[in-house]
Image (cartoon, coloured by chain):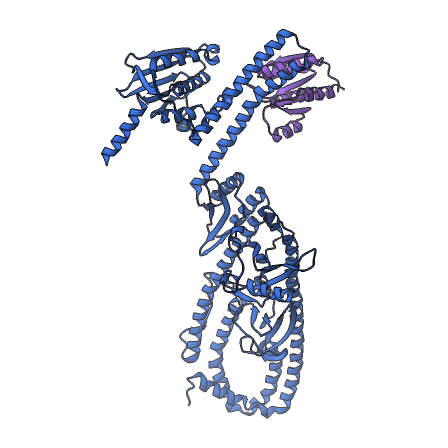
Chain colours: A blue, B purple
Amino acid sequence: MIRFSTLRSRLTLAFMLVSLAPLAGASIAQGVASFQTQLAETISIERAQATRLSADVSAYLTGFEAQLATAAKTISALDIASSQSLLAALPAYPDSFQEISLLNKTGQELVVLSRLRIVRPADYKVVSADSPEYQAVYPAFQAVLEQNKPYYSPVFFDAATQEPTLTLALPIDDPLTGNLQNILVAQARFQPVWTFVASLAVAEGERVYITDQTGRLVADVNPSLVLAGTRRDLQKEGLSEGLTGSQVILAEQEILFGDQVFVVVAERATSTALSSAYNSVLIAAGAALLAALVSTFMGILAARSLASPILALSQAVGRVAEKRGQFTADDTIALPSLQARGEIGSLTRDFAQMFDQLRLAAIDRTQDLARRETLAKLSTSLITARNREEITTGFCLVLKESLGAYSVVLSNHAPDDFHLAVAARSGTYSLAIDRGQPLTVEELGMISTAAPLLGTRLDNLALVEEVLRADRMKTEFLATMSHELRTPLNAIINFALLIQKGSLPAEKVSELIDRIRANGLTLLNLVNPVLDLAKIDSGTYKLVIKPFLLREILEDTIKNNASLEGFLKKKIELIQELSPDLPHMVNLDKERLSQVLTNLLSNASKFTKQGQVTIRAFALSSAYFCVEVEDTGIGIPPNMMNRVFERFTQVDQGFGRAQGGTGLGLTIAKQLVERMGGTITLKSTVGVGSTFSIKLPVDVEQAASATVFEKVELR
Amino acid sequence: MINTGPILIIEDDPDSAEAFRLGLEGAGYVCEVFGSAEEALPHLSTAGALVLDLALPGMDGWGVLKEAAAHNVPAVIVSAFHDPDVADQAERKGAAGSFPKPVNLEELLACLSGLKT
């Protein structure tokens, strides 16, 4: 007995058996007729499928043209010099397009809207044939320039997006002369077409795909073949070689899109399409098989040993195919025993390996697509956001849906000039979006609020918070100042009006004039600190350093402040404790020293309801002395201690704002003390009181040179 | 709506209150000045109208506005908060008018005379 140990020898046997078939010629002729009917039917089914699909695809492609025409209208109507109007155009930027550029006839970029990269007007260039970044744009630009008609490129694989892409370009005429003025070039995503094709319901063994004129695959259920696979047999209808090289029945339908021809192909594997036809052939052949009993018996034996593993394998392949590439990490597949010997065994092992690779690739691709889709959505929602609500909404929605953690990069050009170059980074992909204008503080605030809630990391967070806090304080300060300024202005303006009317008695008029003056002084006291701080900030604030009698200045200042409304009205005692060891003469700016003390006393009078305010001065050493202002006021909570010296800060406990003022007094005091070579510190207990201590040098000039000397020695 | 009672000026800045009082009396109104909401509230039911500041010690102007609405007394807001939101909010809460400080007395008087017809 012969051992059929190899596939080749088994097949030889199978062919021997089949060659017996012609013995039943008449029956077979009948089977063939049935086969031909079946073939014709299948062709007509596939023809219908191709026609239906081509209508859908053609609608999609027409959509590209329509969207581009709309975009063209908006973009060419732009005032190109203004980035504001560029923003206004963004809602008209359909997401089918990765990038749209408006070029003039020399190839200079006038407007570039991009989902792929950050392009600022300053980056606009002249497109050239040599530059790889313009390898899609340049030919389109050139073609329109030469022919003055719309241009459609073949589908190509865009390295930047990793997607099949189509370049469309339109001439834009000068509305006055009708001559070619500009050229609009857009990169359209072909992927939606491909996704659409992949999603089509097809019959078992059926496959639909799109090729270009040369038979190159541009859309298929298997994404790895797109732009890689080619249909070799370009027959239009009937029995042909399919995409994978096997025998199929197919029908095709052409779509004209500008200069390009797309061919929609629907094919069905002959084995499934004609199974019933084959059956009738087999029935006919049955008679012949009966006539050769011994051979048939041997044939059945051979077929069984051959068929069962192949059948199992084919079922496994079928199951893999059913998944249409939608694998998950724990997908498994039942395979015939891997122990099978010979070619079947090695085929099975190969298949198992292939399945494994396919599964891994598919998982990668699924995650990848999801990521990319999220990024695309993020870009669309942020890029088209017209106001802050839309930014937040878009941002939240997209990040909620996102898979991985995104890092939102707020790039900042200057300390408070954050750009929504909010880039979403995920895995190896990054996508940067620039709205082309700095973020408003409100937008920045919303993004920094939304991000942590959504598990998103914000780059530059510390800086963002600093900007937000500074802005909050500035806003509060402006609101307070505005309120504080308007109240005395109201009195001044209306008193003046009443006097002008002339219907008031003379003594009332003179009272009102006094009140106008008092309100004017109030205004001056509000405006002065702001001007002082502005001068200190700009460095134009000059100290006048002259020797003076310390005790005299301290006593004068205390006397002037004892008449403060706060001290008189609330009957707060003002105690002075000037130590005998105080230096006699000091070399400082006496006006500024007096101003600092006045600020501290004024604060103490505002925030003390009852008790006393003590001003104490004593020597610290031969070179330094200290002045303290201690009150029995409301005190300052620990968390505010460091901040009271910051500008615009008011300790508002339902108490601060009612006291009025600019909130700049302590800021100015600190700056002045430091300018005079000293320090100011604070001790406070809420409900008990606060003590501000000023340490100053006796001679600021000597102190300054001593410091320099120390530094030199240290080296 | 005819209200015959005095106009209550509720304003904590004495100078502004004085300016409003002189202006209103010059136009023939009878006025009473209060430095806080708490002092003014007992007189609300007999008031003809209110000239009402928002930033007051204790109960603020919004609280007074609510009380005034309950008594059907028209109130005109005068506030140093210079914000369109204040005007909107005042209108929503039923104020008869809203003037940012510095207030134009002529406009305030025109608004009050509109209430009296």
In the displayed structure, would residue A590 be above or below residue A177?
above
Q: Quadrant of the N terminus of chain A?
A: bottom left
Residue A593, horizontal then vertical, whole percent: 38, 20
In the displayed structure, would residue A672 be above or below residue A84?
above
Residue A28, horizontal then vertical, whole percent: 62, 88
Query: Can residue A490 be seen here?
Result: yes
Residue A25, horizontal then vertical, whole percent: 62, 91
Residue at image location 41% in from the left, 84% down from the top: A5
Most foreground residue, A5 or A691? A691
Q: Quadrant of the C terminus of chain A?
A: top left
Horizontal side, residue A559 vs residue A503: left or right: left
Most foreground residue, A11 or A591? A591
Query: Can residue B74 be seen here?
Result: no
Residue A596, horizontal then vertical, whole percent: 40, 20
Most foreground residue, A514 or A97? A514
Q: Quarter-wise, where is residue A578 in the image?
A: top left
Most foreground residue, A396 or A144? A144
Horizontal side, residue A192 vs residue A453: left or right: right
Label total for image: 0
Horizontal side, residue A614 vs residue B116: left or right: left
Q: Quarter-wise, where is residue B92 in the image?
A: top right
Q: Residue furthest right?
A: B117
Residue at image location 45% in from the left, 27% down from the top: A533
Residue at image location 48% in from the left, 13% down from the top: A565
